[in-house]
C-alpha cells in the first residue's frame, strides 16, 4: 500500500488566494505555507476574539 504525501495549504502573499500549489494560479507568484496558531486551553485573548466576532456578526445582521 502506498501512502501519498499530505498536501499543505499555501497562500499567495500578493493576491491572498489559498491553494495547494507551489505557485499562485492567478498571478504565478510563489506561495508560502500557512501554519495555524497553536491551540491552548488557557487562551488569554479568546474572550476578546469572541466579543469582536459577535460585534461583526451583529453589524452584518447575521445575529
Image (cartoon, rainbow, N blue to C red):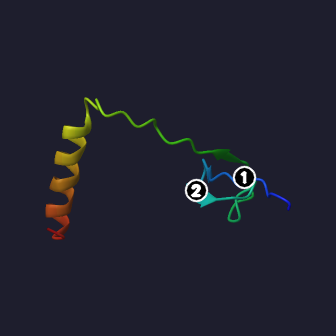
- Of the 4 image quadrants, the one containing the N terminus is bottom right
Residue 46 x/y as whole percent: 25, 38
Compared with 18, 50 (above or below) is: above
Dot 2: within a 10 Å radius of its alpha carbon, few (fewer than 14), some, or many (20 or more) residues? few
Left or right side of 37 for 41: left
- Of the 4 image quadrants, the one containing the C terminus is bottom left
Q: Residue furthest front?
A: 1
Tell me the residue at 70%/55% (across/down): 7
Residue 42 x/y as whole percent: 28, 29
For disc 2, the marked residue is: 15
Disc 1 is placed on an element classified as loop
For disc 1, the marked residue is: 29
Disc 2 is placed on an element classified as loop
Choose between 32 and 35: the one closer to the eye.
35
Left or right side of 11 for 3: right
Q: Residue furthest right?
A: 2
Residue 10 x/y as whole percent: 64, 51
Tell me the residue at 71%/65% (across/down): 25
Q: CA distance from mark 2 to mark 1?
A: 9 Å
- The quarter of the picture where residue 49 lies is top left
Tell me the residue at 62%/53% (across/down): 9
Compared with 9, 48 (above or below) is: above
Q: Are marks 2 and 1 in contact (CB under 8 Å)?
A: yes
Badge 2 or badge 1: first in the primary sequence = 2
Residue 20 x/y as whole percent: 68, 58
- The quarter of the picture where residue 45 lies is top left
Amino acid at each position: 500500500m502506498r501512502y501519498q504525501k499530505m498536501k499543505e495549504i499555501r497562500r499567495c502573499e500578493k493576491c491572498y488566494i489559498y491553494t495547494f500549489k507551489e505557485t499562485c494560479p492567478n498571478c504565478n507568484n510563489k506561495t508560502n505555507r500557512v501554519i495555524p496558531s497553536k491551540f491552548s486551553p488557557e487562551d488569554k485573548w479568546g474572550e476578546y476574539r469572541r466579543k469582536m466576532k459577535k460585534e461583526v456578526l451583529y453589524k452584518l445582521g447575521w445575529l
